[in-house]
Amino acid sequence: MFDFSFSWSAAFLILFVLWSKEFSCNAVETFASRSYFYVGGHYENTTDGEVMVGQMYAEKLVPLKATQKYPLFFITGVAQSATNWLNTPDGWEGWNSYFLCQGYTLYLTDQPQRGRSLWLPSDGILTNYNLTFVQNYFTTVQEAKLWPQASLHTQWLGNGTPSDPIFNQFFASQLQQQSNTTLTTLNNVHASISLLSLIGPAILVTHSHGGPYGWGIADAVPSLVHAIVAIEPEGPPFVGEIIAHGPARPWVLRICPSHMTLPFRIPES
């Protein structure tokens, strides 16, 4: 069973570092040694012959002076790739450079069946977000007003439309994704377990749609998850309220069954 209590000290430490005003690295991308490899995946026989499915691209960045005991394993949100953690669409340093400056070794990934992680027709249907969706839910939500707090949105630089080159950089980075949420959850958890089995205990930094993957990984291999820092994790429990409506995440924070201690045994309870 994964004990969430151990993660708080590490989580607060990382957030403190993130907000510290002593950050002085000025490079667009901080220098680091870079390597890549693939984890997970297995061979299957298909009508086109034997292929590998479920593999995940992983990129390792090591700072000039690694001083932190545990590496950071970044898990992206919906429609994003490992580039999400590099430079920002408006040219600012990303999380990648920031934490390299703090002495962390980083692992960035493209989720299975997305970006540099191969998708095959036998893997199911892919989907992507159109212009209207991205504006309504990410960049001009204060105008779409699809939920009560949307009018308070102020965090997007620029006007959030195609007339803004910052928006165009962001929209160009949007990738296809597996439409089957259960399948993509299982694929991500399995591939991530393979990565952690290779690199050892790490701090998971999850974002948005990637949030539930972190809980699933910690549930499966608690000894390999030192802490979880969940940034705007997908929610709320049991029901979809914003992008999708109706029953969702029947296991509180997850789609798939959990081994964590819960006050019920089955979702129907």
Image: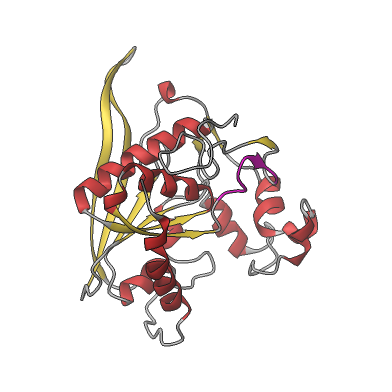
Query: Would residue 156 be found to the left or right of residue 40 on screen?
Result: right
Classify 36 as above or below 165: above
* Up/down of 104 relative to 140, above or below: below
- Left or right, 139 with respect to 96, comes to right
Residue at horizontal 49 percent and vertical 32 percent from the top: 182
Q: Quadrant of the C terminus?
A: top right
The answer to which image quadrant residue 57 occupies is: top left
Q: Quadrant of residue 48?
A: top left
Question: In the drawing, does residue 164 fall left or right of residue 263?
Answer: right
Residue 133 place in picture, x, y as percent: 68, 46
Residue toward you, 203 or 164: 203
Res. 29 visible in picture: no
Disc count in the image?
Answer: 0
Q: Is there any visible trace of residue 221 in the rendered image?
A: yes
Q: Which residue is drawn at 41% across and 77% down?
A: 17
- In the rendered image of this protein, does residue 142 appear above or below residue 235? below
Q: Position of residue 72 (x, y in %)?
A: 33, 61
In the rendered image, which quarter contains the N terminus?
A: top left
Q: In which quarter of the image is residue 24?
A: bottom left
Which x, y percent locates residue 148? 79, 57
Residue stretch in magenta: 234-241
Q: Main secondary structure of the magenta part?
A: loop
Q: Where is residue 34 in the image (x, y as percent from the top left)?
A: 24, 61
